[in-house]
Amino acid sequence: MRILVLNGPNLNLLGRREPDVYGDVSLKGLAAELMLRAPEDVELTFKQSNHEGDLIDALHDAFDYEGVILNAGAYTHTSIAIRDAISAIAAPVVEVHISNVHARETFRHESKLAAVCIGVITGFGLTSYTLAMHALIEHWRNRHD
Ligand code: DQA
């Protein structure tokens, strides 16, 4: 089972960026944690970009993956182009956020992406990604068992 873990703008600064909001673990640290927790038959690919078009290309490259874990950062709240890319691909996508976006500024309460994702996980810190991985595994099993 192939899962793409796709992180958007400013998430390259994880661990250094607003640690009171996003914690002190780096993006590399997050990848290591997730790999430790992944079952043997799950192959994780990690990508990060600060650019909207690169994120769209990465989604296209994962067209027929079994799942995508997407933290689109602030593009979550603005990007119809990323929403269209999620709709275009066959892979199921889970939207994740480290912080609880609903407990923050009102502009973070709206997601342009959520409606075309299979679900949203927000507010559990880096555990949001682990929960999303397990959600995708369950989703895949339910369709294939
Ligand atoms: C975020 C929440 C977004 O509102 C913000 O723009 C981010 C990170 C999160 O993981 O909590 O860059 O997606």
Image (cartoon, rainbow, N blue to C red):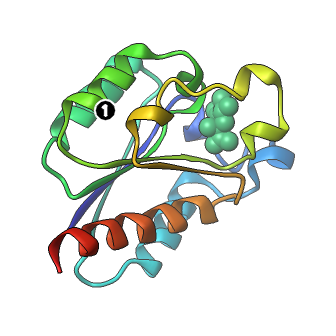
Above or below, 39 against 28 in this view is below
Viewer-closest of 12 and 81: 81
What residue is shown at x 59% (from left), y 22% (from top)? 77
Q: Residues within 10 Å of mark 1 (few under 14, many from 20)?
A: many
Which is nearer the eye, 18 or 60? 60
- At horizontal 75% and vertical 56% (from top left) the residue drawn is 24
Q: Toward which corner of the image does residue 138 lie, by quadrant?
A: bottom left
The residue depicted at 17 percent of the width and 81 percent of the height is 145
Q: Nearer the viewer, residue 128 or 116?
A: 116
Q: Where residue 125 appears, x then y in whole percent? A: 70, 58
Residue 3, how many percent across, how many down?
29, 59
Quarter of the image where one finds residue 45: bottom left
When the figure is inspected, residue 22 is found, relative to residue 30, above or below; the finding is above
Q: Amino acid at mark 1?
A: Ile
Residue 134, horizontal then vertical, whole percent: 44, 71
Q: Quadrant of the N terminus?
A: bottom left
Q: Which residue is mark 1?
A: 86
Q: Can see residue 75?
A: yes
The residue that appears at 16% across and 73% down in the rendered structure is 144
Asked if residue 23 lies left or right of residue 78, the reply is right
Q: Position of residue 37 (x, y in %)?
A: 46, 79
**Horizontal relation, residue 127 to residue 64: left or right:** right
Relative placement, left or right, of 16 versus 55 is right
Q: The residue tagged with tag 1: helix, strand or loop?
A: helix
Q: Is residue 95 above or below residue 125?
A: above
Total marks in image: 1
